[in-house]
Every structure is written in C-alpha cells, then in structure tokens.
Image (cartoon, helix red, strand yellow):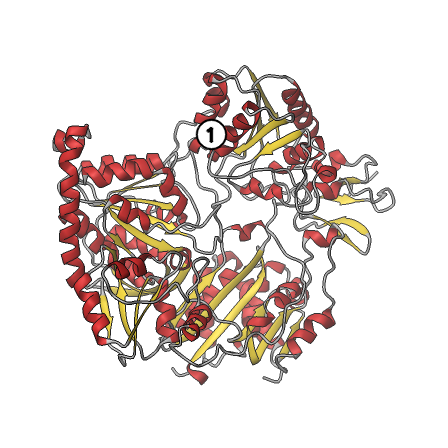
Amino acid sequence: MSMQGGKQDILMVGVGGQGIVLASDILGDTALDMGMDVKKTDTLGMAQRGGSVTSHLRIGQKVWSPLINAPEADILLAFEKLEAARWVGYLKPGGTAIINNLAIPPLSISLGTQLYPADEAILGSFRAVTGAVHLVDGTEQVAGLGDIRTLNIFMLGYLSRFLPLEISDAQWEKSIARHLPARILDLNKRAFVAGREAAAGVDI
Amino acid sequence: MSKIRKLLSGNEAIAMGAYHAGVRVATAYPGTPSTEILENLSKFKDLYAEWSTNEKVAMEVGLGASYAGARTMVSMKHVGLNVAADPFMAAATTGVHGGLVVVSADDPGIHSSQGEQDNRHFARLGRVPMIEPADSQEAYDFIATAYEISEKYDTPVLFRITTRVAHSKSVVEIDMGADRAERNRYFHHHVEKYVMLPGHARLRVPHMHRRMGELTELAEVTPLNQVIEGDGRTGIITSGVSYEYAREVFPTASLLKLGLIYPLPPRLIERFAGQVKKLFVIEELDPFLEDTIKAMGIRVEGKKHVPHFGELNTGAVRHAAVKAELMTQATPAAATVAAGNLPGRPPLLCAGCPHAGAFFVLSTIGKRAKVLDASGRSEKESGLIITGDIGCYTLATYPPLRAMDTTACMGASIGQAIGLVKAGVSSKVAAVIGDSTFMHSGITGLIDAVYNDAKITVVILDNGTTAMTGHQDHPGSGKSAQGSATQKVDIAKVVEGAGVRNLQVVDAFDIKSVRSAITSALGSGQLSVVLVRGKCAITNRVRKNKRQVDQDTCNDCGVCLMIGCPAIQKKEGKLYIEAGACMGDECGICQQLCARKAISAEGKAG
C-alpha cells in the first residue's frame, strides 16, 4: 500500500464528548490493518470536562514522532468551528480542511466576556492557507438520522473520501464494528454512509 | 509462538508487558498520565491489583509483595513518587526478592499536573537503575528486561515514561505465548537485609554502590542501548520520545539511543563521541544525560539550545538544531495564519456536578466576584480564604465561581488552612477537599487540626469516586480495583473518630442546606467539617425532567450563570438550558437559585 507523499498527518479537533478519540482510533486501526505504520496521540485528562480535544493521527510506511508538527497536517478534521479556528495554524498550505458547521460556545461567551468568532473570520483564516475548505452540516445530517452522537462516524465517512488509501467498504464496516457495541452499529453504519455521500459531490 | 500486532498506548503496553513478565501484584494510586497501567492490569484475574490509598502505601504494599518473592509493579505519576519517596528510598536500600518495577510517569508540559519535575533524578538519588522506552513496543519489551535486572542486581528498577509515551498509541507486536512462570514465592527471614536499623543500613549502602558499578558494566553491553549508524557528522545522544523527534529531524545522523538511562555507559559514550564530529544531546526537561556526559570529560552540547522545560516536538528539535548550527534548513514556514484572540475553552465542572453548589455558596459568601480582580488578585483579605486541593474541583478556580485561593499538592488544603489561621489571618479559612484526596492524605491534616485546635472549616466534597482521573474506586467507594465488593470506609466516622465535634452532612443538591451548613460552620468559631454528598454527574446516568427557562418570566439577572453550569447558556441575549447537557431532577440547583421562578422542569412551567 503506497500513499502520496509517503505519509498522512490527520489532526482531529473538537470538544470533549464529541467522540473524536474514537474516530481516530477507528481510522488508526484501519490503517494498521492495511499494513501501514500508525502513531496517534490524544489530549486526555480534563477533556471529559468539556475542554478542547485534539487527536494527532499519523499514517505512513514508518512514523517516528507521534505529534504532528505545525504547519504540516495534510487534513484538519474539525468537529466544531471555534476549535477549527484554534488549530488552523497546523494545516499545511494547500491541505484539506473539513469543518463541521457547529458552534459550541464556551462559557465565556454566555458570560458575555468574549465573542464567538464569525463564520467569515473562521473560514477566511482557512482560505488564506488553502482552497480546500469544506464546511459540512454534519450535526444537522446526523440529527436527521436520529442521534447526534453518531457525528464522529459521519465525519469519518466524510473524511474517507479524502484519504489516499484505498479502503474497502467491508474494511470500514469491520473497523467500525470492532469499536462499537452491536446495538448502535446499524445507526453508525448509516452515519458513515451518509458522511461518505455528503462528500460525494465535493471536488477533491 | 503466536504473535499479534495491535495499536496500544504506552500504558496498555506496559500493563501487557508486565502481565507477560509474570507480575503477580500491582499497586497504584490514580494519576494522569499513569492511571491506565493499573486499570489494564486489574482486568487480569490471575494477579492481584489494588488501588492503594496513596502512592506511599502503594510502594509499601509493593515492597512487601516483592519481599514475598512476587514480581510486582507499582505505578504512579511523577508527583506520586514524591509521596512515595520514603518507602522508595527504603526499597532502594533493602533491595528486593521478587522483581520490583516502579513506573514513574512524568508530565513535561504539565498537561494535567500541579507542576513539572524530572524524575530521572530519583534514579541517582536512590542509586537504582532507570529504564526509559521511546514507544509502545519498547514499553512492552523493556518491562521483561526490567524484571530480570531487578532480580539479578537486587534492586528496584525505575521505569520512566512521559505523557507522550504513556498516552500515544503505536504498533506493538505482542507475544501471546509468553509464559507467566511461577517463581519462588516465599518470604525468607533476613533481618540484615530487611530491618533497616542503622547498623544494618550501613551494611546495605556498600551493596548499593557495588550494584551501580555492576550496572554500569551492564549499560556498556545491554541491547537496551543502541547505536544507529549514520553519516558521522552529527552524533545525537537521546532517549524516550525525544528519540522519535531526533530520528525524524535527523534522518542521516548517527544516534546513540539510550534505553537504560541510569547508570550511563562511559566507554560506549566515549567511543560514540569519537566517531562523530559534533555531539549533541536531545532530552526533555533537565540536562540529566548531558551533565553526566560532561562529567565524563566529553565535549557535548544540548541545553544551550534545547528548551529546559515543556515538551519537545519535531519543530522544537529542528529549531534547536538550527541554533546549534547542526542544520541550516529553516523550520518549515511558521504557521501563515495566527489563530487570533480566540475564546479559550477551559475544562469546566460538568452540568449537574455535585461540587458546583458548594462552590457557588463559598463564592457568594466570600463575595469573590467583587473582591477579586479579573486576574484573581486582591491586596486586601476578603473575609474568606479558600484553600483548595487536587481534583475536578480545582476547576472552581476559573470564572464564574473563582472559589479557590490555593492548590499545592494532594491533601495540602487542610494543612495550609491550619497554617493560615495559626499565622493570624483576619479572614475565616475554609479548606476544600474531595473524598479520594481526603483518603489519600487529608486525614493526617485533619488530625493535625484536631490536635492543634485549628479553627478552620473543612468542606469535604464526596462524590463517591476518584473523578478527575476517570472514576477509579477508592476506600470510600465500596468496590476494589478488580471489581469485588469491599468494606466502605465511612468518611463521617473517620472525621468523628478523629475527634471533630462539629460535623454536618448535607445533600450536595439541596442548596439551602449547603448554604446553612457552610455558614454555620464558618460562624461556629471552632474546627468544623461539612461533608457534602452527591453523585458524580458522569457516573450518574439518570436524566429526568430537564430544566428549562421561561423567557417571559426571566429578567436576565444572571444568577444561574454564576453556577458555571455548562448547560446554562446565553444566545442572542436570552438565557436557555441546553437539554442535551442538563441533569434534570438529579440536580435542580439553578431552579433553587432562581428568585423569579423562571426555571422549571420541562412541560411543568408556571
């Protein structure tokens, strides 16, 4: 299995509770199954308390550092817009940004001490780096499927179109099944397909 | 022999390696980034694993198990080894019977700790060998070697990891056929080895020195240390995760990768130095390797260019290499865009957290919003000083609660409170401590307060679990690390048994009771304890009758926002409660605080 450029650095970011670590675990295991070297590192600890979450995932023939260096991420997969903006400096020029169209305001916004950045400011900061900026209505789409907790698998489905790895549907199903309990598997498989289809019309 | 390949974290790999090396006893106190080691070991039924009351006890239990001949693992975060330093030094002196490996998980960059310290110094202090893996495969492989060294050289072995190794996942080839051979499990009476009277200890010290000499010889030849041949221009000495960064940044350099990082091999290092034009050490935190190499009389550079604190990464290593003129290539274009002044997203107490009500009360009694400036300072005493401790509740330091004045280390809140009143502050002093931290090292402080008649109020926040590190059981939870039911240590009885006469036990979600208990305790003029009990919002899965705001009744007074509940938010000037986050009937604090009764259960407005 060869990849363009020899490696893929994928930075996943969002807010505690959005299932980011699970999404990167699934992709990491999938890449391992395909014979790639994989390293990943998550911010843990206080993330469960609603803080920022990041997961660095590096795939290649041989990976040394577990951390992605800024600005060298090939793909930034953001589950929330403010978190996307926070990590824009990690994206390599011309890299791919996939941003879920969701705002989770931190408490300072409700307390009125700070302002949530406008969409245009966030997207503008990405467009200064790359033409490949994809704003995705992920939360809205998975709400339509019945459970917003499947957002992580939807985002993984969307991301799957952008990976320079040929991963079969059967392989994805196997990887997802390995990480999720049977009773929510069908729902998540539908979320994955929905994410994949949402990216179908996108110019990659 | 069957082998499988898996993506494992460093902690998972250590647990698996320890299991396959035949570990029979494992002890720990939870602490990021070390917690998952014991969590994973406790799943195996053919060994004994315990959450100990604190790291000192964990080390003592481990030492006893080792004396009994069992291969034993004791794991803790870096500051845990401060707590366990006394029995650790004793273990270093007595030596072992069954192999004893002590895992110290350092936290460069302070991801989740009260400070940064380089625990490699403990190896020198204790005159014990230290092993450091660079990734999960080494974490798995090196454990077996650590046990062989421990038993052969009659010494505990320090196994040092850092957050980045503990919590990164990388590919591990696991030997599923590894045998957990039973070794000699018995205690042999040997008072000169195990009873550290001065006369006996004096006999052990020469042994410790002899063993370091022998271990230095081992360091010269052990496969834990490897030379990676390169172009000979730049020679890099490194260990741990720094090796991964060095390898990526210097693909053609010669490397001496140390796995046994104490004691160091002088002849190997001298030989390596002779083969390269310029010698450079890449290590996180202190110049531990560098200073030792310099003391050998070898010219080497490192910390002149590499940062002394924080975590390294490939960017930082490249930057240091350019400064040291080892490469001319500039770092890849720095981020072309600044993220700008974005709102931060600090971690918060959860929606429905049982600690929030008590902190709201302390915050309002202390008039914290008025007294403290934006940076949390006030030159004048506020009338209420709140000493804090280590746990989720330390987050109450952040706005809007801002209800904490100190946090030092596990259990310090009570001792600090005693010190403040004995020094004669004019304010009242409350110490706030969680249940697991109270068990860990709050009890001795409380006994000191009883004994020395310190007129402080101790607020014990009891959520029945060690929440911050991921909900581990503890002596008050009624369940062991391996899931069996066990005798609950009753905090109220401990407090009364210690001699505290003013104890009140209140429901965390009854804000009136919490307020009246804390107010009367602070006003009592005597040593008082308020035990605030409520289930952790993360472990409590019940969600019924979520609260909502009646927009017509709400006058936007903002009191509910002062709880710091993440479910209570404001959009376009209107307060609302995020239904996905609200705990409903299990909490209800916002409803109790709303003077206009604008908050009610869903569908029960008016």
Looking at the rendered structure, the secondary structure element under dot 1 is helix
Quadrant assignment for the C terminus of chain A: bottom right
Residue B437 spot, x, y in % from top left: 47, 35
| Amino acid under disc 1 | Gly
Quadrant assignment for the N terminus of chain A: bottom left
State the residue in front, B214 or A192. Answer: B214
Q: Based on the displayed image, in which of its 4 quarters is residue B597 positioned?
A: top right
Q: Which residue is mark 1?
A: B442
Examine the rendered structure and indicate whether residue B399 appears above or below residue B591: below
Work out which residue is located at the far right of the displayed protein and give it. Answer: B552
Residue B500 spot, x, y in % from top left: 52, 17
Q: Is residue B498 visible?
A: yes
Give the left or right position of residue B234, taking residue A170 as reference.
Answer: left
Residue A173 spot, x, y in % from top left: 47, 69
State the residue in front, B369 or B44. Answer: B369
Q: Based on the displayed image, in which of its 4 quarters is residue A67 positioned?
A: bottom left
State the residue in front, B364 or A149. Answer: B364
